[in-house]
Image: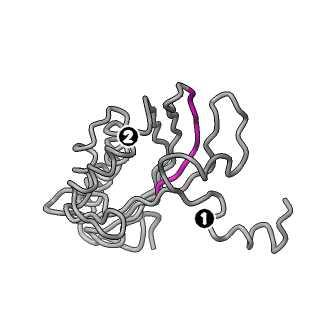
């Protein structure tokens, strides 16, 4: 298996397609961040597959846009800085990725919070365009911009539910041993 996942393109055309796919997939998180920060929820929803699942009972980009409008209304200004982006191809039309992000959010009372997070993404090519199939949100912390963060700080508050990092990695018990000491 290569560092780009289990799919191993054999021909020059397949390798070129993977390079173009990498470029397209890398644009998705940055376009997502810009869409959220500019409150362009229609553009953000368009980054997802047409039949995207929204919660347990809704599907489609219109439902996703409405959901993001609700989330965006709970946040004033926002700044999302996209960092590392790791992509693994399962085949020519399916990939997975991990995206690191630093975010800063203005709360309704005028205070600012900052945090670090990861998105665990699945991507699929639909009609020649790469789209998010799913984004799973994991957070290291979020805290007042003037506060020194601790692991897990603030992840139980705010408009988005999340999965705590580093616990979501699942392999920390192997690394640190069975005891919780570090």
Above/below status of 110 relative to 122: above
Residue 134 placed where, x, y %?
Answer: 36, 62
Above/below status of 171 relative to 40: below
Left or right relative to 32: residue 173: right
- What residue is shown at x 44% (from left), y 36% (from top)? 75
Indicate yes or no whether the magenta region holds residue 33: no
Main SS class of the magenta portion in the image: strand
Question: Which SS class for mark 1?
Answer: helix
Mark 2 or mark 1, whichever is nearer to me: 2
- What residue is shown at x 35% (from left), y 39% (from top)? 36
Q: Quadrant of the N terminus?
A: bottom left
Instruction: Tell me the quarter of the picture where residue 177 sits.
Output: bottom right
Instruction: Tell me the quarter of the picture where residue 149 sits.
Output: top right
Residue 25 placed where, x, y %?
Answer: 32, 53
Residue 168's disc is: 1
Q: Which residues are magenta?
A: 111-119
Residue 72's disc is: 2
Residue at the top extreme of this rendering = 110
Residue at the left extreme of this rendering = 127
Left or right relative to 19: residue 147: right
């Amino acid at each position: 298996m290569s560092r780009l996942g289990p799919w191993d393109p054999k021909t020059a055309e397949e390798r070129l397609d993977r390079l173009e796919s990498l470029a397209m997939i890398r644009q998705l998180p940055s376009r997502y961040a810009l869409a959220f920060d500019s409150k362009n929820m229609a553009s953000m929803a368009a980054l997802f597959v047409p039949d995207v699942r929204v919660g347990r009972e809704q599907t489609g980009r219109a439902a996703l846009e409405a959901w993001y409008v609700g989330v965006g209304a709970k946040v004033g200004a926002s700044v999302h800085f996209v960092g590392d982006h790791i992509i693994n191809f399962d085949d020519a039309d399916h990939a997975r990725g991990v995206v690191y992000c630093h975010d800063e959010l203005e709360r309704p009372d005028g205070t600012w919070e900052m945090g670090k997070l990861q998105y665990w993404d699945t991507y699929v090519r639909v009609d020649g365009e790469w789209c998010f199939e799913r984004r799973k949100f994991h957070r290291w912390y979020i805290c007042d911009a003037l506060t020194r963060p601790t692991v897990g700080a603030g992840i139980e508050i705010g408009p988005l539910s999340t999965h705590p990092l580093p616990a979501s990695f699942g392999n920390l018990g192997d690394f640190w041993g069975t005891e919780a000491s570090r």
